[in-house]
Image (cartoon, rainbow, N blue to C red):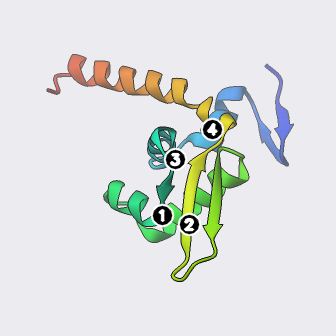
Amino acid sequence: MPEFEFEGQTFRNPVELALHVIGGRWKMPILWRLEQRVWRYSELQRELQGISHKMLTQHLRELEQHGLLTRTVHPVVPPHVDYAITPLGRTTVPAIEALRTWGALYRRRRGGA
């Protein structure tokens, strides 16, 4: 497949683009949880043990920029912010499920419990 440009970046194939959008340690776990329900920022931070404030904020912003989630700020004190998956974001769920299945298979075959 020839190189292509998307949103100002050059990619050699669609897999590179997909990994750019949903790759990394935390983006898929965020999307996986948002597929189940709407989450508040603090809930996500508690649920995703080990993620820093900076990393969660960065990934949420990137996923929002890519159109995979929405951020809703409620005008109350203290501020209340909800994150929800978009219809486009839901299209990532089958890929995430396939990776989860493969990861479990790999773990079993390589000797993990």
Task: Tell whether 108 sits left or right of 77.
Answer: left
Residue that carries the numbered disc 2 in the rendered image: 81
Pick whichever of labels 4 and 1 is earlier in the sequence.
1
Residue type for callout 1: Tyr
Pick whichever of labels 1 and 2 is earlier in the sequence.
1
| Helix, strand or loop under label 1 | helix
**Residue pictured at 48% horizontal, 48% vertical:** 30
- Front position in the image: 68 or 58: 68
Measure how far apart labels 2 and 4 are at the Cα level.
18 Å
Above or below: residue 17 compared with residue 34: above
- Which of the two discs, 2 and 4, sits closer to the camera? 2
- Which of the two discs, 1 and 2, sits closer to the camera? 2
Residue that carries the numbered disc 4 in the rendered image: 89
Residue that carries the numbered disc 1 in the rendered image: 41
Looking at the picture, how far across and down is residue 2, in whole percent?
Answer: 83, 23
Above or below: residue 9 compared with residue 61: above
Q: Does the residue at mark 3 contact the one at mark 2 (Cβ under 8 Å)? A: no
Q: Does the residue at mark 3 contact the one at mark 1 (Cβ under 8 Å)? A: no
Pick whichever of labels 4 and 3 is earlier in the sequence.
3
| Helix, strand or loop under label 3 | helix
Q: Does the residue at mark 4 contact the one at mark 1 (Cβ under 8 Å)? A: no
Residue that carries the numbered disc 3 in the rendered image: 27
- Which of the two discs, 3 and 2, sits closer to the camera? 2
Looking at the picture, how far across and down is residue 25, in whole percent?
Answer: 45, 47
Pick whichever of labels 2 and 4 is earlier in the sequence.
2
Residue type for callout 3: Lys
The single residue placed furthest to the front in the displayed view is 76
Residue type for callout 4: Gly
- Front position in the image: 66 or 109: 66
Residue 11 numbered mark, or none: none
The single residue placed furthest to the bottom in the displayed view is 77
